[in-house]
Amino acid sequence: MTPRSCNFDDFGMATATLAGPLEARLAAIREVGFTQVMLEAGDLAQHPGGLEAAARAVKASGLRVTGLQWLRDFEGLSDQQHAYKLEVAQALLQMAHAVGAPMLMVSASTHPAAAQDLETIARDLRKLAMLAIPLGLRVAYEAVGGSRTVHDLFGAWDVVDRADMPNLGLAIDTADTVLAGVALDDLDLIDPDKILVVRLADVFDAAGHEADASDGTLRRRVFPGEGPRSVQVAALVLQLAGLGFRGDYSFEVFNDDYRQLPLPTVAERARRSAIWLAEDILRRSTPLPGQMQLRAVKEA
């Protein structure tokens, strides 16, 4: 299958990649040309003006919302713990609806008391997906390296397939997937229509020593085209497109260095990465990560 014709509008950024007030981050994302943004629930809940003011800021930015993250440690709990997490999930679903997010992101549980039975996990995700239906929302489930049970892409797909809900699908993280050594030839086992979003990042360290972080985040991520595994990230993106992925790409670069830099500097790095992926990778050019830096030199 030939990859789709991809353009810059298929890419967005996560607010978690940037530091500063929500309005400033939204403006920086918009000013470099992105048309969509992945929101962090904490950014909205902690807004000085409250959720309503945060929702107004998002709407005023003109950016389309890719999704809302994260619901953590939801599935596999029982009794009071399950009831507590169910209330949290319902609140996050309402928050997603309030800001126009089409989906809620859910990371695989790392809770020590979570059941490891796949049917139980699937049952809980089915319940969550059913709660999302009246709000017109989807649920994107992502494996986590530190999860007790669902720690890779195929484990997440197994659970999503068992749950069998039309609004439940996968979120794929390129950094985690590459570090896990997923065989690209095995990706055709996954229904591409169930891939809801691809989260884009490379890692700064070639060894990827932070890959087993319990929260599934790498604090030393870099944009694709900047790290030692960019060829593998590009190959993964190209393979997913070839299989028929038609969703959004979101840059999820959690890097403490970037959060100390001016917002336009970081947003510009994301823009260059998006151009490299859209024009050089998804349009069948050779995936050479150095090409992004070469273009930056020429533009300077």
Image (cartoon, rainbow, N blue to C red):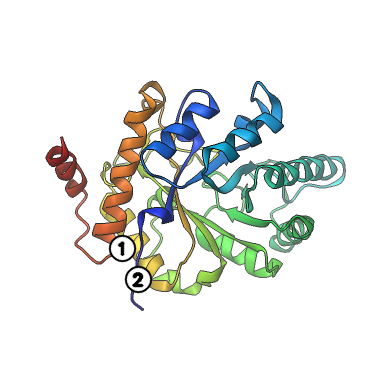
Q: Which residue is at the front of the view, 184 or 207?
A: 184
Q: Secondary structure at mark 1?
A: loop
Query: Residue at point 68% right, 45% down?
Result: 96
Position of the C terminus by quadrant: top left
Give the side of residue 157 with respect to residue 282, left or right. Answer: right
Distance CA(mark 1)–CA(mark 2): 7 Å
Q: Position of residue 55 (x, y in %)?
A: 65, 36
* Of pointers 1 and 2, the one earlier in the residue sequence: 2
| Contact flag, marks 1 and 2 (Cβ < 8 Å) | yes
Q: Which residue is mark 2?
A: 3
Q: Secondary structure at mark 2?
A: loop
- The amino acid at mark 2 is Pro
Query: Residue at point 52% right, 38% down?
Result: 61
Q: Which residue is mark 1?
A: 282
Give the side of residue 4 with respect to residue 293, left or right. Answer: right
Q: Is residue 299 visible?
A: yes
Q: Is residue 117 above or below residue 66?
A: below
Q: Which residue is at the front of the view, 210 or 230?
A: 230
Give the side of residue 56 with respect to residue 21, left or right. Answer: right
